Image: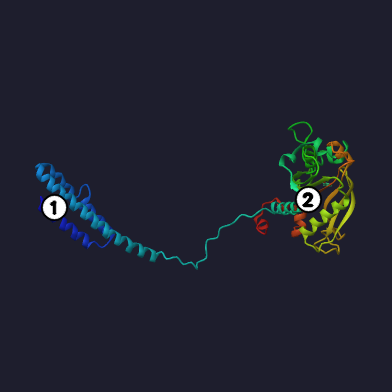
């Protein structure tokens, strides 16, 4: 039996030596060392031997198996490296090849314009109001009553405002000014906040109007706030947003919640003030409404107008974005046309 073992060992060693690849080695392993291999059939014969012989032959069998396994392992490592080298050579990557095109998403121009405006006002000391002070579904009370808008004001008409059936007197807010009231109810002056968000109006959609759009509301209430502060802040905002060279003008106007009120125009970016279709020949484009917070509004939220004054403003985000990037149709913001969105 010993001789048999030794001769098998020799055969197996030769086979290992002659192997040309890891596949050959696998075959050797199968032939000699697997369950159905030659060694195992010999090991099965061990049970017929005497205890003494069993010890000697068993030990030899183990020794030989170990030796073969080591030999196989050593050789297979050599093959592994050799075959890996060959594979790597074959799969060599040409780093000069152009890569696969992966389409990347972009930030929507409304979002980026909003972020830009918000960050300008933040540098001027304004903070964002908590979102719960600026809900899109709002009561008439906050959207109109508390803003000093008379009961019979045409803006309240269903033709201008979307009413909801969720509860009586609830609307989709028509302006971000609702945030002014909720903020003043919840905070004490000094209050210096901005509130961006979506507003809704029952408009016929065309190149200039959509039935929802976005605004940023601003509010600054403190002791001794004057119209001069309002002009200073808004001029500074426009200077930063449009670049220093753009002329502006404050034009007197009317809003129920401010007194006095003004609208701010910037010089038309299309014609540099000469007059064109975009600015209806005037050379100016309106960008925002503003004014000193009306005494009635302050009283309504329990702020003493003898002690505090404030200014407020509201601007259309689409409008500001259209003016800066020379976009001539508001609907482009909402069509999700990649050819438009890719440009930002
Ligand atoms: N809420 C006005 C609008 O939607 C804009 C506005 C004007 C807001 C004057 C203000 C303001 O805060 O003071 O047309």
Q: Nearer the viewer, mark 2 or mark 1?
A: 1
Count the marks: 2
Residue depicted at 48% across the width and 66% down the height: 95
**Image coordinates for residue 103, horizontal then vertical, percent:** 58, 57
Name the residue carrying label 1. 5
Q: Position of residue 155 (x, y in %)?
A: 84, 41
Secondary structure state at the residue bearing disc 2: strand
Image quadrant containing the C terminus: bottom right
* Residue shown at the point (30%, 61%) measured from the top left: 79
Q: Is residue 52 above or below residue 29?
A: above
Where residue 316 is drawn, which disc sits there? 2
SS label for mark 1: helix
Q: Residue 317 placed where, x, y %?
A: 76, 51
Disc 2 within 8 angstroms of ligand 1 (CB): yes
Q: Residue furthest bottom?
A: 96
Q: Which mark is residue 239?
A: none
* Mark 1 neighbour class, 10 Å CA radius: few under 14, some 14 to 19, many 20 or more: some
Give the residue drawn at x 74%, y 44%. Answer: 129
The percent coordinates of residue 4 (x first, y second) are 11, 52
In the image: residue 343, left or right of residue 20? right
Toward the viewer: 17 or 21? 17
CB at disc 1 and ligand 1 closer than 8 Å = no
């Amino acid at each position: 039996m010993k001789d048999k073992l030794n001769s098998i060992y020799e055969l197996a060693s030769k086979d290992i030596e002659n192997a040309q690849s890891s596949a050959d080695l696998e075959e050797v392993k199968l032939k000699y060392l697997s369950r159905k291999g030659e060694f195992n059939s010999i090991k099965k014969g061990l049970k017929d031997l005497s205890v003494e012989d069993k010890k000697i032959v068993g030990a030899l069998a183990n020794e030989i198996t170990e030796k073969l396994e080591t030999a196989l392992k050593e050789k297979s490592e050599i093959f592994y490296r050799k075959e890996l080298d060959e594979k790597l050579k074959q799969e060599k990557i040409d780093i000069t090849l152009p890569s696969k095109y992966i389409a990347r998403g972009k930030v929507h121009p409304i979002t980026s314009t909003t972020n830009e405006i918000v960050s300008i006002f933040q540098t001027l000391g304004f903070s964002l109001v908590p979102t719960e002070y600026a809900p899109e579904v709002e009561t008439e009370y906050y959207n109109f009553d508390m803003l000093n808008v008379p009961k019979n004001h045409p803006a309240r008409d269903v033709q201008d405002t979307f009413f909801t059936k969720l509860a009586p007197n609830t609307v989709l807010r028509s302006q971000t000014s609702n945030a002014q009231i909720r903020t003043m109810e919840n905070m004490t002056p000094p209050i210096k906040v901005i509130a961006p968000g979506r507003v809704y109006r029952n408009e016929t959609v065309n190149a200039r109007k959509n039935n929802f759009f976005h605004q940023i509301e601003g509010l600054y209430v403190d002791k001794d706030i004057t119209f001069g502060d309002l002009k200073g802040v808004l001029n500074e905002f426009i200077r930063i947003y449009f670049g220093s060279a753009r002329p502006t003008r404050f034009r007197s106007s009317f809003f129920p919640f401010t007194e006095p009120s003004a609208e701010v125009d910037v010089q038309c970016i299309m014609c540099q003030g000469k007059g064109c279709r975009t600015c209806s020949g005037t050379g100016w484009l309106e960008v925002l409404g503003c004014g000193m917070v009306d005494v009635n509004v302050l009283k309504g939220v329990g702020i003493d107008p003898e002690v505090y004054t404030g200014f407020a403003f509201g601007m259309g985000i689409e409008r500001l974005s259209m003016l800066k990037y020379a976009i001539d149709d508001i609907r482009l913001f909402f069509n999700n046309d990649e050819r438009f969105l890719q440009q930002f």
